[in-house]
Amino acid sequence: MFSFPFKKNKNTTAAYEEKPFFEKEEQVFFGRLRRALPNCYIFPKVDLVDLLEPMSTDAKLRRTEQADLEDRKIDYAIFDASMSLLCVIELNEELGDDGKYLTNEAFFKAAGIKTIRWERQSLPIFDQILRTLAPFSSIAAPKPDIAASTIMRNQQLAATTTPPNPDTVQAIYSSHPTPSNIVAMSINDIERLTPRKYIKTAYPHLWQRICLFCNEPMHLKRYLTSLVIQGPGEDRVGFPNEVLVEIASIQAENERHLDKAAPRTTWDTAFINR
């Protein structure tokens, strides 16, 4: 009925530009945190609703407590390698009606989570951060990326039309389900050790499994041993010598990685078994 001349043209494309995530001082402070906590995960500007949840059994009260968390953020949340929340960091700047800094400390205190507070206008230097966060500075490093290992294994499984025996694969992985954190060989290393490609050409299903297990030395050792040692009730024809030579080369290199990771004894080996 009426037309509005000021109505926005739908064909107009809005323009945007990148907004810096950190102010300059914030970026410097974040760098200091990363240096002080090299093995922790540090997440900035996190919503409280992603970190806390009400524990009240009363539904109405729980909704009220949930509403109290809405629109609240914490400046930094510090997690360990297993993604357990270690502490939170607040940088004070906003004053309430009573002249005191607004803080989320009461929420985290109720959850048993430590809150560290610093002045935004006077951010601590690296040494001050390190002293305050000393309990977390030497925390254990994250283990190898399990997801990446899974992707690699899936790629290897898809690389051949002859899938490996799931019983063999499952048995070996279940023997050591947690990544060993031992530096392992890569598929390129396996290729280097077998330049004539006897295994890859004559026994592609064995080659696939070797590549499958190469990122975990304990798994690879068990599989290579199963190839050359005949178990009870088994009747194998055996491998050609050139294939056995390649298997032995891979075994020897894999043992080197295991030897490097083995804990050293405090006893002098010259006196053992005397």
Image (spheres, rainbow, N blue to C red):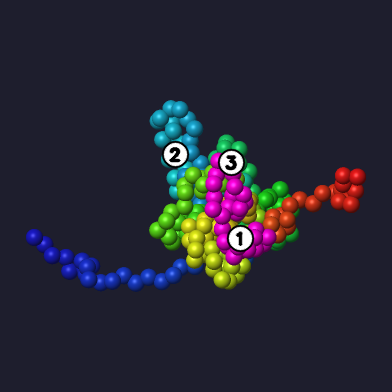
Figure quadrant of residue 250: bottom right
Residue at the image position 45 percent from the left and 27 percent from the top: 57
Left or right: where 240 falls relative to 123: left
Q: Which residue is mark 3?
A: 232
> Label 3 to label 2, Cα distance in Å?
63 Å
Q: Amino acid at mark 2?
A: Gln
Report whether residue 88 is seen. Answer: no
Rendered location of residue 11, percent (x, y): 22, 71
Give the SS element for disc 3.
loop
Figure quadrant of residue 174: top right
- Tell me, for residue 260, which label it has, or none: none
Residue at the image position 49 percent from the left and 32 percent from the top: 55
- Tell me, for residue 66, which label it has, or none: 2
Report whether residue 163 is seen. Answer: yes
Give the SS element for disc 2.
helix
| Disc 1 to disc 3: CB gap under 8 Å | no
Q: Which residue is mark 1?
A: 244
What stretch of residues is rendered in magenta?
224-253
Rendered location of residue 176, percent (x, y): 60, 45
Residue at the image position 76 percent from the left and 50 percent from the top: 263
Rendered location of residue 191, percent (x, y): 57, 68
Crowding near pointer 1: few (<14 within 10 Å), some, many (20+)? some
